């Protein structure tokens, strides 16, 4: 029942926020904040209770919830939670709370509808992380898409319509491919077993012909790597991130991208182990190219939010690299990367938002020399810039290190290329600090440093990123039971990377 | 011994307090916390050292908490105090403390006093983690942490973009080396399943025979990390620019401690290098070549801090040479004495710079012998030690050991010996060129401010240390004392020296001493050496490495970034959108509302369909 509540509360809260806005424009904020805090406490307390290596190792699934929905088609309202989902939920509600706070001063118009959309996106994301029925999964996948379109299109910056359209078309196109693949899998399963079902657990054992499996896998994979995003499907991301309001950017970078990564870990690899192994080297290569290409593009940007957006392309390359390395170290790293990237990039977008509130620009060329005016914001930025370049002691390092150690064992050459990405990350990250905080200011600034509200938002982020850097074990423990399920692939037969004639 | 966790914890705590309460505790408070945290850490190190020297403790491992554990892979936040890390800890805390005290005077008028001490404390904490780490991952934490602090402190005066550029250069260039080191760690995890130093070093001789490709690759990659951090060829280019930071930073980070991290790494993993003769020989060659080219560059600089920077590169070259010939403890010995005399030289240079209103050009100094008497004396002591004047200076004993072993150790070679001697000659020349330019001749810039006690007392202490620290290890010919190498013996194997008689050793020492004096005499007479102008410029620019890297790496990267700012891949999609739109326009153009066109269209369509049908019927 808890699982159902996790989804129901934000959705109900969203509706309530929309309705109450008619009486009071401030009420939706409080409703959204309370909803998110409640969810956060709920999820965190679950994690807290379970944080014990012994208890984690017993069973993968912590809780399940199942009700028939459309039994004739084999569709059920099936939810289940394991350590991976739980971590993603904690991240969702953590960043959700912050995205409510970050909009406190920024969003002045149509607060009711804004918070309705915000809570619906978050509810959709929650659903995506919990669903174990592929039809329902597709449903939630769309639920998170449409409110996001409104968030960008209504409350975004100058070029918001273009960005919103682009975001919608890219994700929708990917989503349709996934729908096709889901239906394909559904019929293949029915054909071979006679049972029509969308249930994840039953589809796991679908016997697949080699070619069919590979095509279906590509359908899922493309949907997820559009979302992730990996090159060459990344180009919606810089526009969407840049034009979205701060809360939108935080949710996009922190959470929506993670649904792509989650989809790979939860669906692509367990459903199609053979195909995943077959394509693994190429996907890892794509990841490494993304790391370098995204990093180089990040360096070239002059718009702060756009720069951070491209760093996401680079960092998500690590996810792709690690997910297809097929070993526990890399997978632990991938989950860690999902969490830490959510935190650090979310924080950078929040800083960008705070700077925009003060300077009314995102252009790096118009900033510079802000340290004396904003020392506290400078320190916070330094922490997250260092996180983004992978400084040990901060969570992102753990993630990248584990991914690289793991992928080294699978593909050393590709790993070397990815490791060079660390140098590129240094180059673009340091440029951020230089352009914004160091150097001489163009004019005499009299700017307020971090306000109490901003301080309250930043402090948990800083604490979280340092905590994950020095004591990541609770996350590692939580993910551990999920890993055998991912590894449960038939032993790999060395498949040469060559096109061989098919029947 | 549980309390040794305080050694790194105190500086971190100090940094945390200074960051959180900056501007609320006043200058006095900042000084007390900044220096106090390091001072107490130094005291604790002293107590721990007493335990070791008295023989009560051989080594002490303190697990603090489990950093990460995944399957069989395990890395802990675990400290390891053994003779080698103790030697480094001692230098870091003790010299660090003196530099902190000096900084209270040097930075007294800086508005960012508190930020300075926060960064310095953070640095000391990270550096201590580097040397105290019991596994390579934790060492990597310290390794990158000191890189961060180095970056923050080089760019401390952030208003000048040049300082920011120097800071970024330091970070990025060292990161190139760090990347190599990271790959070495990946390989070690793959082959030994661990990053625990004790495990790795115990497994290495079992897993690999001498010269095995894997271990040679690992050693080379570790060397990559070491040359980055220690500013050796080919990644030495960042150190001279790093002088943009405040002088105490140069003394602490870019002379005494951080830049010797590479030496520490190689000494710590000496078993891996012994197993890879090719890599170890490369260490020696890198050291020998670096000490020579940096010596040449030091000789033609005009900025006093850049002379000292090149000199540091050159002296670390000696340490690498020692490591490369298997004279492990000799490298550590030179590290200790170098920390004393180079910190001394940097800080006295800082005293001069402040006295002359931030003038760093030696050609604008001169005649300071009488005006800054105290500084002159300590600078002279430091210079004598750097130039390795025989018998009375610490530098003589440590350098002499390296010179001698470069030839006579098992991996030694006469070419190394010659390089070391030539380097010693150049060292004497550039050092005393500096002394004569700064303190002799006519006064060119007026002294406006004399350094106070907080700056002078640390200098006096270091001056004493620069003299007596050499007596802990004396050569065969002069008493033969081996306190340091005995102390380090549990960690560092003794050097294998196979040939060389006392007479030869006397000759070697005699030549070295003679060369030092000759160098000083030449400087006294001529103050410069006839070098062609072009060559001088070439040396001054650091042998053109900067220009080469600029052309090979920086420019192409910036160019590629610039031309592709708008992401060529996005064009593909824009193109797709444009195509769709133009198709749409073409199609909508046919919807003209003119009936004739529609009928025409229907007729044409019918004709096409009919012809296709007919063609299909008869063409087959």
Image (spheres, rainbow, N blue to C red):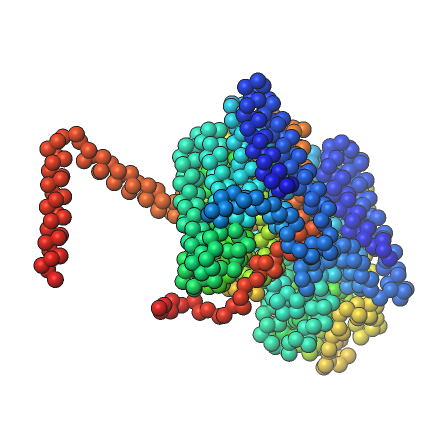
Q: Position of residue B585 (x, y in %)?
A: 24, 36
Residue at the extreme front of the image, as rendered: A72
Where residue B77 sits, quadrant-wise, is: bottom right
Left or right side of A305 for A396: right
Where residue B120 sits, quadrant-wise, is: top right
Can you see residue A366? no
Where residue B1 sits, quadrant-wise, is: bottom right
Relative vertical location of residue A228 with respect to residue B259 in this rendering, above or below: above
Instruction: Tell me which residue sits at (54%, 68%) in the image.
Output: A491
Can you see residue A122? yes
Pick the residue in front: A95 or A47. Answer: A47
Q: Position of residue B112 (x, y in %)?
A: 69, 36
Instruction: Tell me which residue sits at (22%, 38%) in the image.
Output: B586
Relative vertical location of residue A18 with respect to residue B289 in this rendering, above or below: above
Q: How many badges with numbers are in the image?
A: 0
Question: Which quarter shows the C terminus of chain B?
Answer: bottom left
Pick the residue in front: B343 or B122. Answer: B122
Instruction: Tell me which residue sits at (73%, 77%) in the image.
Output: B496
Instruction: Tell me which residue sits at (79%, 70%) in the image.
Output: B489
Q: Position of residue B114 (x, y in %)?
A: 73, 37
Q: Position of residue A197 (x, y in %)?
A: 49, 52
């Amino acid at each position: 029942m808890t699982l159902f509540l996790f989804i129901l509360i934000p959705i109900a809260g969203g509706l309530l926020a929309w309705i109450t806005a008619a009486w009071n424009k401030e009420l939706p904020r409080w409703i959204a904040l309370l909803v998110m805090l409640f969810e956060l406490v709920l999820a965190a307390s679950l994690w807290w209770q379970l944080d014990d290596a012994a208890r984690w190792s017993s069973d993968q699934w912590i809780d399940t919830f199942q009700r028939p929905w459309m039994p004739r088609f084999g569709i059920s309202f099936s939810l289940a939670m394991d350590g991976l989902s739980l971590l993603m939920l904690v991240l969702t509600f953590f960043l959700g709370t912050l995205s409510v706070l970050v909009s406190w001063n920024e969003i002045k118009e149509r607060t009711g509808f804004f918070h309705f959309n915000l809570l619906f996106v978050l509810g959709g994301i929650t659903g995506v992380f919990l669903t174990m029925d592929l039809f329902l999964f597709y449903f939630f996948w769309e639920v998170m898409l449409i409110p996001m379109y409104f968030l960008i299109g209504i409350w975004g910056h100058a070029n918001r319509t273009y960005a919103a359209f682009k975001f919608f078309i890219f994700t929708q196109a990917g989503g349709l491919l996934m729908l096709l693949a889901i239906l394909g899998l559904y019929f293949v399963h029915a054909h071979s077993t006679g049972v029509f079902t969308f249930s994840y657990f039953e589809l796991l054992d679908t016997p697949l012909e080699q070619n069919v499996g590979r095509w279906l896998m590509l359908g899922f994979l493309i949907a997820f790597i559009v979302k992730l995003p990996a090159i060459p499907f990344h180009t919606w991301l810089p526009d969407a991130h840049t034009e979205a309001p701060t809360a939108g950017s935080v949710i996009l970078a922190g959470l929506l991208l993670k649904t792509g990564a989650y989809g790979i870990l939860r669906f692509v690899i367990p459903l199609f182990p053979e195909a995943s192994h077959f394509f693994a080297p190429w996907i890892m290569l794509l990841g490494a190219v993304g790391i370098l290409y995204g990093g180089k593009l990040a360096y070239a940007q002059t718009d702060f939010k756009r720069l951070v957006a491209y760093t996401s392309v680079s960092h998500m390359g690590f996810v792709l690299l690690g997910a297809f390395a097929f070993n526990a170290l890399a997978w632990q790293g991938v989950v860690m990367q999902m969490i830490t990237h959510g935190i650090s990039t979310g924080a950078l977008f929040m800083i960008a938002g705070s700077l925009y509130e003060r300077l009314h620009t995102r252009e790096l060329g118009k900033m510079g020399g802000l340290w004396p005016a904003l020392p506290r914001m400078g320190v916070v930025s330094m922490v997250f810039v260092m996180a983004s370049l992978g400084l040990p002691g901060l969570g992102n390092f753990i993630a990248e290190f584990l991914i690289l150690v793991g992928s080294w064992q699978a593909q050393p050459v590709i790993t070397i290329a990815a490791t060079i990405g660390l140098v590129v990350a240094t180059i673009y990250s340091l440029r951020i600090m230089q352009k914004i905080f160091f150097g001489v200011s163009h004019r005499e600034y009299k700017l307020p440093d971090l306000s109490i509200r901003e301080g309250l938002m930043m402090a948990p982020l800083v604490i979280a990123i340092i905590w994950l850097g020095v004591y990541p074990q609770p996350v590692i423990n939580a993910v551990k039971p999920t890993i055998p399920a991912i590894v449960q692939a038939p032993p790999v037969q060395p498949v040469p990377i060559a096109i061989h004639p098919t029947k | 011994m549980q309390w040794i966790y305080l050694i790194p914890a105190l500086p971190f705590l100090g940094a945390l307090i200074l960051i959180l309460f900056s501007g609320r505790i006043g200058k006095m408070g900042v000084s007390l916390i900044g220096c106090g945290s390091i001072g107490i850490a130094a005291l604790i190190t002293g107590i721990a050292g007493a335990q070791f020297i008295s023989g009560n403790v051989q080594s002490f491992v303190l697990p603090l908490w489990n950093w990460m554990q995944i399957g069989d892979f395990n890395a802990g936040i675990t400290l390891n105090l053994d003779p080698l890390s103790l030697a480094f800890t001692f230098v870091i805390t003790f010299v660090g403390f003196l530099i902190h005290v000096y900084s209270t005077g040097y930075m007294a008028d800086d508005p960012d006093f508190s930020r300075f001490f926060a960064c310095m404390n953070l640095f000391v904490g990270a550096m201590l983690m580097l040397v105290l780490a019991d596994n390579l991952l934790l060492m990597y934490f310290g390794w990158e942490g000191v890189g961060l602090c180095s970056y923050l402190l080089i760019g401390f005066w952030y208003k000048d973009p040049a300082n920011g550029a120097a800071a970024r250069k330091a970070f990025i260039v060292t990161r190139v080396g760090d990347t190599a080191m990271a790959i070495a760690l990946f390989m070690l995890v793959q082959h030994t399943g661990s990053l625990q130093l004790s495990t790795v070093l115990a497994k290495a001789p079992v897993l690999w025979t001498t010269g095995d490709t894997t271990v040679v690759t690992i050693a080379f990659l570790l060397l990559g990390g070491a040359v980055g951090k220690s500013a050796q060829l080919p990644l030495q280019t960042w150190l001279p620019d790093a002088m943009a930071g405040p002088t105490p930073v140069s003394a602490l980070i870019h002379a005494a401690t951080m830049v010797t991290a590479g030496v520490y790494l190689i000494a710590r993993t000496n078993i891996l290098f012994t197993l890879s003769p090719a890599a170890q020989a490369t260490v020696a060659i890198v050291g020998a070549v670096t000490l020579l080219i940096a010596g040449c560059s030091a000789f033609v600089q005009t900025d006093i801090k850049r002379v000292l920077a090149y000199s540091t590169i050159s002296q670390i070259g000696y340490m690498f040479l020692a490591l490369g010939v298997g004279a492990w403890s000799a490298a550590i010995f030179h590290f200790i004495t170098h920390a004393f005399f180079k910190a001394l030289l940097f800080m006295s240079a800082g005293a001069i710079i402040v006295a002359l209103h931030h003038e760093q050009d030696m050609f604008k100094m001169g005649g300071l012998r009488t005006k800054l008497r105290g500084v002159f004396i300590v600078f002279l002591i430091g210079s004598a030690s750097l130039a390795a004047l025989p018998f009375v200076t610490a530098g003589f004993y440590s350098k002499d050991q390296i010179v001698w072993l470069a030839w006579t150790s098992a991996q030694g070679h006469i070419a190394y010996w010659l390089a070391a001697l030539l380097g010693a000659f150049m060292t004497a020349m550039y050092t005393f060129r500096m002394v004569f330019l700064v303190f002799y001749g006519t006064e060119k810039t007026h002294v406006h401010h004399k350094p106070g006690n907080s700056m002078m007392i640390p200098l006096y202490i270091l001056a004493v240390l620069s003299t007596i620290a050499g007596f802990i290890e004396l050569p065969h010919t002069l008493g033969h004392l081996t306190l340091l190498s005995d102390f380090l013996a549990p960690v560092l194997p003794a050097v294998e020296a196979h040939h060389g008689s006392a007479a030869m050793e006397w000759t070697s020492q005699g030549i070295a001493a003679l060369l030092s004096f000759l160098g000083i005499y030449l400087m006294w007479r001529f103050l410069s050496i006839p070098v062609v102008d072009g060559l001088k410029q070439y040396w001054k620019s650091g042998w053109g490495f900067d220009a080469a890297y600029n052309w090979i790496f920086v420019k192409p990267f910036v160019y590629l970034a610039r031309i592709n700012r708008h992401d060529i891949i996005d064009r593909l999609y824009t193109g797709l959108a444009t195509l769709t739109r133009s198709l749409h326009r073409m199609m909508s153009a046919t919807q003209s509302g003119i009936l004739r066109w529609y009928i025409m269209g229907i007729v044409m369509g019918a004709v096409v369909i009919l012809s296709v049908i007919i063609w299909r019927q008869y063409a087959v």
